[in-house]
Image: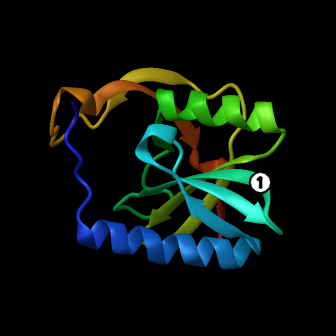
Amino acid sequence: MRPIYENAQTKLDETNAAQKIANFLSVSLEKQSIAYRIDYKLLSGGDHVGLLEYKRRKFTYGKYPDVMLSEHKYKEGMRLAKKHNIPFIFAVELDDGIYLAEMEKGYPVTFSGRTVQTRDKWDVENVVHVPMSKFKLMGK
């Protein structure tokens, strides 16, 4: 079983970012269990209106050409979005803001992931590369 690397601070940071995202999108968020694979359900008036995956990356917009997401998370988010006819949003908190991208088909897949400072054998896996151009700064 894979270790969990979240700690109290990273969970607090995610909770704070999630609240900002919820306010910006005018929705409420429901945190999902780890078994669900996607971080949050987006709710409006009790209706399930979207999915949200959140990541924190320690760089600024434009430093890299893309942001990576586990292919497993991507496929599951896309499957659920299609099944429920709702959007799947990838939120990335960078050093200079929170950026949102509505996920779509066709992103390149490579066997990559966390290749610098690898923590365990699962850090390197198939990932999708979401171009930075797909992300919009929240609030702009």
**94 and 17: which one is in front?**
17
Which amino acid, mark 1?
His
What colour-coding does the image apply? rainbow
Residue with the mark numbered 1: 48
Residue 126: image location, x then y, percent: 41, 23
**128 and 122: which one is in front?**
122
Residue 128: image location, x then y, percent: 51, 30
Query: In the picture provided, is 8 more to the left or to the right than 62?
Result: left
Farthest residue, direction front: 46
> Splitting the image into 4 quarters, where does residue 2 fall?
top left
Seen in the picture, residue 81 relative to 30 is either above or below; the reply is above
Residue 107: image location, x then y, percent: 62, 29
Write the residue at 36% across / 74% down.
Answer: 12
Write the residue at 74% across / 38% down.
Answer: 81
Write the residue at 25% across / 70% down.
Answer: 8
Query: In the picture provided, is 45 more to the left or to the right than 17?
Result: right
Badge 1 element: strand
Q: Quadrant of the N terminus?
A: top left
Q: How many marks?
A: 1
Would residue 89 be visible to someone looking at this image?
A: yes
